[in-house]
Image (tube, rainbow, N blue to C red):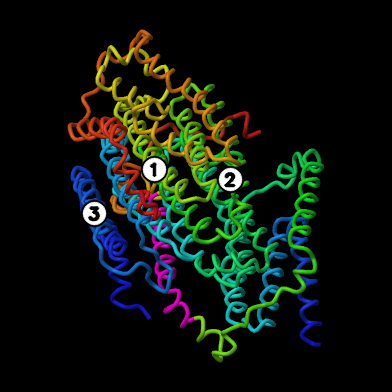
Amino acid sequence: MISLNDILTLLPESFLTVAICALLLLDLFLKPAQRSVTHYLSIVALAVTGWLVLQHFGTPTAFGGMFVRDGIASILKVFVLLTSALVFVYARPYLRDRGLFVGEYYVLCLFAVLGMMLLISAGNLVMVYLGLELLALSSYALVALNRDSPLSSEAALKYFVLGALASGLLLYGMSMIYGATGSLDLVTIHKAAAEGTQRGLLLFGLVFVVVGLAFKFGAAPFHMWLPDVYQGAPTAVTAFIGSAPKLAAFGMAYRLLESGLDGVGGHWQLMLALLAVLSLAIGNIAAIMQSNLKRMLAYSTISHVGFLFLGLVNGQPEGYAAAMFYAISYALTAAVAFGLILLLSRAGFEAEEIDDYKGLGQRAPWYAFLMALTMFSLAGVPPLFGFFGKLLVLKAVAVPGTLWLAIAGAVFAIIGIYYYLRIVKVMYFDDPAEGAAAIVKPADAPMRAVISINALALLVLGVTWGPLYGWCARALGITP
Amino acid sequence: MTQQILFYAFAAVLVASALAVITLKNSVHAALSLVLTFFTAAGIWILMEAEFLGLALIVVYVGAVMVLFLFVVMMLDIKPESMREGFIRFLPVGVIVAVVMLVEMLSLIGLKSLQALPLPENPAIAAGGNTAWLGKALFTQFLLPFEIAALILTVALIAAVTLTLRKRSGVRTQKPSQQVLVQRDERLRVVKMASEGPKNGDAA
């Protein structure tokens, strides 16, 4: 039976659900000119949810183990909410210029956020699947939001078909795990996996679960949908699906692999190692050849997913903490990168070709500086945020047995620096193209302020990375 | 004994009709074979004393989904030839992948362990009825997933409306209020012209 404690534990999610429904109804009565009300109210809803997440009430698990509320869940949720709020701020001018400034964007994004929160807190295979579907279904619709663009519709269809396939694989794997352990509860599965009953069937299910997971992460060789979706979707949507869901994906991997299938760790570690190296190789090498910035960032995502997997490979708390730190640093950096593309776009012009950034250093020195900062962080140049993520992950795998992974990671990280620095070179050392706008359009003030703070935070968090990592480590039970 | 005979009969029909779904050329026939597949699957479930699931499969899939499916298949003009393009070309790769998968699966699970797989006790039988047990489980143990499933359906609804409700340019719609106000002069033009009588040549 449900008790008051169950409801209290689920309060942040419940509040968000009610807020979404209220927003959906309220939006019906707003005129297009008043749409900003929806915008600000959704940010307020995210902020209140974040505050509720940080309150310590309720119990560690609720609804008979369906829902888990631990330190990892709280950290990931706070950053999911923060990243989503940042993306909302960056998306507004872009959406307004293109006639996409509709309440549905906010409602669907908020539903996706809710799905991510449930996924992060899942304590049962059913909850993992339902949280994932809530996130995925909202994302498919968001990608197709711009109905007049054939590219966008194509991307949405690819995303939908491949996403459905991945869900099918994941469900098939889950059914096998259920067959092997007789339970959907992750704690019970953990026990059964450790005891080693029905090992063959369990491994069979594990393969499909890992494949489904890799599909959702966009890890090579299951990455084919990612570049098309990132390029085809409206940039405001790419910014959303390219940042916060990576945190949720980490949460999902942690729940499935650590909470559930730790007993067969040796098997999934090898699979993850192969996926990680392939992702690093394909992501970094394919990104070099791209001329479209959104597509390049898509391939860069694949390589970052490879790094994230490196953190998971050892199955040790240090590795998980490093991967979590990495996911947070990636989500915040990706938000700025896509935010700057949104900022430099204007009505009828998408600043998504790398050539569009020629001479940005002369045209808009401040934004060029922010972009350079972001690229350096993605590349992992010290002392920026991204560097410490990479360092911690490499430190976690640089132990006897997985040393080759650390070496592969370092080599591909160095290859990756090339294409990030190419953006910096184009901005500072190339002359502006003929007819390029002399100055960037005056973006709206909140966006300029927030994006500057966000980009400078990459520097600040890079220099003072200790507290954040300490927070992640404590959540995973590492005593410093 | 009867149960086993029934199971093998249902299973044989199921496998045969499932094969028919993917081999038949006519897509309407394929859809009808899928109906048969669902029917036999429902039969097997009922044999396993999961009568609620069996009936739900018939009502939901056979009754609603497949009818819709047939409707769509009949409405669309699908040419099977175009879908079969490249079938022969990709066949060797497909067969190799399928064989490798099959060998891998069998070697991992093994035929023996499948036979020896102990089925968990069906709690519904002890509770004295499938429907009552499912209802209780849905609203106690699985309350949270049940509610989230409702949210997912809401998202599907919002997404469907968002993606289909839009203003298209160049679409002609009826405006009855203006149509009934039409005047005779707007539709009918009376042209004055000389009457044409039978000419001399025509009359002959």
Label 3 and label 2: CA atoms lie apart by: 37 Å
Q: Is residue A162 or residue A472 the one in the foreground? A: A472
The location of residue A458, given as percent across then percent down, is: 30, 32
The location of residue A20, given as percent across then percent down, is: 29, 57
Q: Secondary structure at mark 3?
A: helix
Q: Residue at x 75, y 52 (%)?
A: B101
Magenta stretch: includes residue B146: yes
Which quadrant of the view contains residue A372? top left
Q: Residue at x 33, y 55 (%)?
A: A74
The location of residue A133, given as percent across then percent down, is: 47, 56
Marked residue nearer the N-terminal end (1 or 2): 2
Does residue A281 lie above or below B61 as drawn?
above
* Quadrant of the snapshot with the N terminus of chain A: bottom left
Looking at the image, residue B191 sits to the left or right of residue A34; the answer is right
Q: Secondary structure at mark 2?
A: helix
Does residue A469 lie above or below A133 as drawn?
above
Magenta part of the protein: which range?
Answer: B135-162
| Residue A322 seen | yes
Asked if marks 3 and 2 touch (Cβ < 8 Å), the reply is no
Asked if marks 1 and 3 touch (Cβ < 8 Å), the reply is no
Marked residue nearer the N-terminal end (3 or 2): 3
Q: Residues within 10 Å of mark 2 (few under 14, many from 20)?
A: many
Label 1 and label 3: CA atoms lie apart by: 25 Å
Task: Confirm whether circles 1 and 3 share one chain.
Answer: yes
Read off the residue under disc 2.
A272
Label 1 and label 2: CA atoms lie apart by: 18 Å
Q: Determine which of the numbered discs, if any, sits on residue A45 in the image.
A: 3
